[in-house]
Image: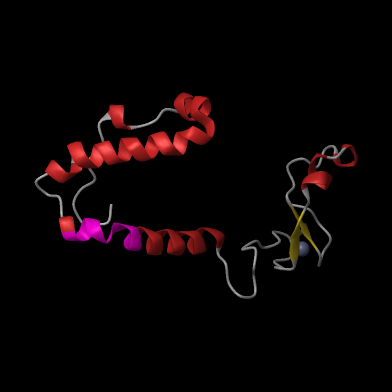
Amino acid sequence: MVCNHEMIEAPHEYGLTFTEWHVLGSQGEHVWEEKKKRLYDEVISKSPIFDRSLHNRIDEIMEERSRKYDEMIRGITKDNPYGVKCPYCGSTNVKRISAFAKFGIFALGKNSKQWHCQKCDSDF
Ligand SMILES: [Zn+2]
């Protein structure tokens, strides 16, 4: 929520279940947009605590938030482009193990490792 009001749970019928997402595939997003629009028209805009001016800025606010959230989650800095650190030596000189290496027949048993430290040569 962008305002300071308590989060009000959306009525269940406006949500999408995992099964629906799965069945809808690429259509899912479209259906979800429709549902959100309906939720907005039928519920949110009628809510007594709804703040229209805030709502008009919602994209802006959410974008800023998700950008900050993203940075926080990935811990990205200039020195650490992947946001990943070697758990053994603490180096940020790491590279992602390619999908081929990860799933290739030569890499059996390494399936859970995603990163390779170029400093101490360990996978994690
Ligand atoms: Zn290391």
Is residue 88 within the magenta segment? no
Q: Quadrant of ligand 1?
A: bottom right
Nearer to the camera, 74 or 46: 46
Can I make out residue 99 in this image? yes
Which of the 4 image quadrants contains residue 76? bottom right
Q: Is residue 91 above or below residue 5?
A: below
Q: Is residue 28 left or right of residue 77?
A: left
Magenta stretch prevailing secondary structure? helix
Q: Which is more toward the observer, 12 or 90? A: 12
Of the pair 4 and 85, the residue shown nearer to us: 4
Residue at 28 percent of width and 41 percent of height: 37
Q: Position of residue 107 (x, y in %)?
A: 86, 42
For the point 81% across and 56% down, the residue is 122
* Colour convention: secondary structure
* Residue 9 in view: no
What is the x, y in percent for residue 54? 21, 60
Q: Quadrant of residue 9?
A: top left
| Residue at horizontal 26 percent and vertical 36 percent from the top | 38
Q: Residue furthest right?
A: 106
Give the answer, above or below, for where 36 lies relative to 87: above
**What residue is drawn where x is 46% and y is 34%?**
28
Residue 5 vertical position relative to residue 119 in the rendered view, above or below: above
Along the line of sight, the residue nearer the viewer: 10 or 4: 10
Horizontal and vertical percent position of residue 123? 78, 53
Above or below 111: residue 56:
below
Report the span colored magenta. 53-61
The image position of residue 72, as x and y in percent, is 49, 62
Horizontal side of 73 relative to 40 (left or right) equals right
Which residue lies most toward the bottom here? 78
Number of numbered discs on residues: 0
